[in-house]
Image: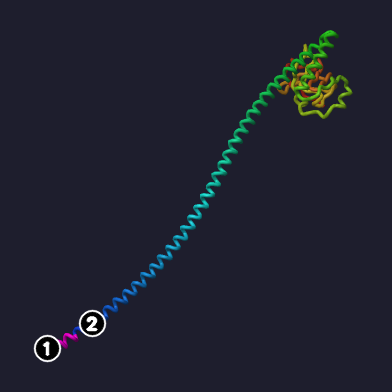
Amino acid sequence: MKALTLVLCVLALLGSAASGFFWWQIGNTKEDLKQQLSSEQSRAASLQSNLNETNTQLEQKVAQLTQTDTELGDTKSKLSAAEARNVQMSREVASLKTAYAAKDESEKKLTADVDALRRDLVQTRLAAQVGNPEEIERYKQTIASLESRLGEIQGIAPAATSTGAGSASAGPVRSERTAAARVALVGTKNAFVILELGASDGIAAGNKFNLSRAGELLAESVISEVTETYAIAQIAPSSIKGALKEGDIASFVP
């Protein structure tokens, strides 16, 4: 009986010790679980904070994307407007080129007309030098008509012919053309030449010109008649050093 009681006491002590051990172990496990829970809660809070920050950044990116899309739309609109302006400018440039080409063609035709009138005027003047009084009067009328037509084409009023020496003092300042005027026509036996300059260049009857070719002096001349655009110069026979021809250069002698 005593032995049974002793066994039961031992078992009771063992059970109590086991209960104490398990209680201690459960307590430690509970504390570990609390720490793990606290750590996971902290981690969850950190993740939530990161998530909130990410959402904020995402919202900012969406706003930036929306703004960029708006700016892109504005840029596209401006680009379309610029392309439209470029097309319009291209059309205007093409129109201007066409107008310039037409103007250039018109100027070429006008220049050709002026040259033809000048040749007719020179030939008429030459014919007037050797005609009878009736023919000379008819030539004068033709010359006046040609000069009037030439003045209309060049946009200037025809000027009266000047034959007096006193007109030299009333002439305008001489132009640079007087330094190298072109001989338009040469009279019979080098008696006179017609120069491609006139009263508009500041020359007058009595002015002297040297005639040369390639820098070589050929003859000396004196202006005997001046119009607005042409002048007749009489050649000094004793000064002739070579045959004159169209295209020779006449230089004013001070």
What x and y, as percent, mark residue 179? 77, 26
Q: What residue type is labelled 1?
A: Leu
Snapshot quadrant of residue 118: top right
Residue appearing at x 38%, y 70% in the figure: 41
- The residue furthest front is 1
What x and y, as percent, mark residue 20? 24, 83
244 vs 37, left or right, is: right
What x and y, as percent, mark residue 194? 78, 18
Residue appearing at x 36%, y 69% in the figure: 40
Q: What element carries label 2?
A: helix
Q: What residue type is labelled 2?
A: Ser
Query: Which residue is at the front of the view, 215 or 76?
Result: 76
Identify the magenta region.
3-13
Whether residue 7 is in magenta: the answer is yes
80 vs 219, left or right, is: left
Q: How crowded is mark 2: few (under 14 residues within 10 Å), some or many (20 or more)?
A: few
Whether residue 58 is in magenta: the answer is no
Query: Which residue is at the front of the view, 244 or 132?
Result: 132
Residue appearing at x 57%, y 39% in the figure: 83
245 vs 205, left or right, is: left
Question: From the viewer's perspective, is the residue at label 1 or at label 2 nearer?
Answer: 1
On the question of residue 21 being in view, the answer is yes
Q: In the rendered image, which residue does mark 2 sit on? A: 19
On the question of residue 238 being in view, the answer is no
- The residue furthest right is 166
